[in-house]
Amino acid sequence: MNKMDDLHHIGLKAREEIAGKVGRILAKDSSSTDREAALELAQLLVEDAAVSVREALSRELQQCSFLPKDIIEKVSLDIEQVSVPFLVASKAVDDEFLEEVVRNCGDIPQEAVASRNGISEAVSYAIADVACQVAVENLVLNDTADLSERSHTRVIERFPQDRSLLEKLTQRSDLPIDVVEKLIFKVSQEFGEYIAGRFELTSDYASYLVSLANRHVFVHTLEGASLHEVENYLKQLKTAGGLNSDLLLNFLQNGNVRLFTCSIAVLLDTAYKAVETHIASGDKKILARLLEASGFAKPVVGVLLIAYERLLRG
């Protein structure tokens, strides 16, 4: 393929065909000579006056695993119908470039990047941190995106009043258990303000009612989590001094045997299966020894045993 210095003298259909062919050559393992000639033509075609020509080139360039940065930039910053499909599917763009697009370009490019398959954690965080709301919604709905705890948290910080977006966030399979607690707190906080005004309750009493609902919902969420997630959360509670007798009593009163068992295992720093076997025996003396070894005083152990007996009878 020879270099063409004056493409504008060639008809539109011919230029569209050339653009498609150039893109296909660059997408394949072509010889160095063909590739060099194709790159020279691509440099001209990305600035063609006809949108259809640039579209034809962009469509084929999506399959390229490598492209010069200036070509990537020109296609990515073109009008929407040329740039969006490229930003969504291009294999040649790296995380650094995608972050730059998210942090420095407008809503449409941000939305396109958020729709990409397999977005990295770094790019996901950039979207959560600065992108427009539609882009963030695209990200949250993108099951292939790697959303870390910091990305989830940033979404909650930026859009604390958007119930629809927060509900979408709760449907993600990778939602960290710590983020579940933040989500529930946000919802409960709003509900607390509502019931305090609606029923003219004191703020303390409203907070108390909300805390009960908050705990019930959160325990229900824990029930559906994997054992690994539950263990991680309870270990954090233990470190913070929150894995106490009040919480264990709540687990028993709500019939959450797995959470109760896992709590004891975490307190004793032992395997869940070992504790489960002991508790499943139904021997109150064994359970009493486990609770005492967990650091609970005898009066507290007595209360927990009564709750455990009621659970068995129920």
Image (cartoon, rainbow, N blue to C red):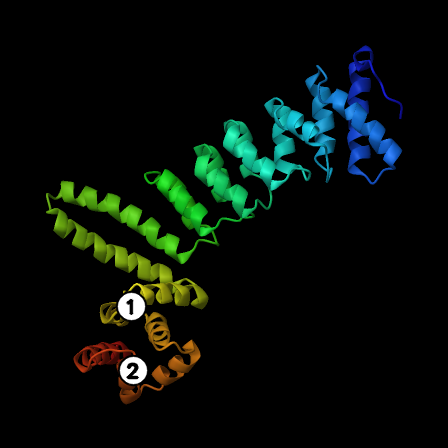
Residue 247 lies, with reference to residue 41, above or below; the image says below
Residue 200 placement, left or right of 129: left
- Please name the amino acid that badge 2 sits on: Ala
Residue 185 lies, with reference to residue 35, above or below; the image says below
Quadrant for residue 95, please give it.
Answer: top right
The picture places residue 230, in percent across and down from the top left corner, at: 40, 65
Which residue is found at the position 29% from the left and 68% from the top?
A: 243
Circle 2 residue: 293
User: Front-most of 254 and 51?
Assistant: 51
The kind of secondary structure element at disc 1 is loop
Residue 256 placement, left or right of 270: left
Q: Name the N-terminal-most of marks 1 and 2.
A: 1
- Please name the amino acid that badge 1 sits on: Leu
In which quadrant of the rendered image does the N terminus lie? top right
Circle 1 residue: 243
Crowding around mark 2 (Cα neighbors within 10 Å: few <14, some 14 to 19, many 20+) is: few
The answer to whether residue 142 of the structure is visible from this angle is no
The picture places residue 293, in percent across and down from the top left corner, at: 29, 82
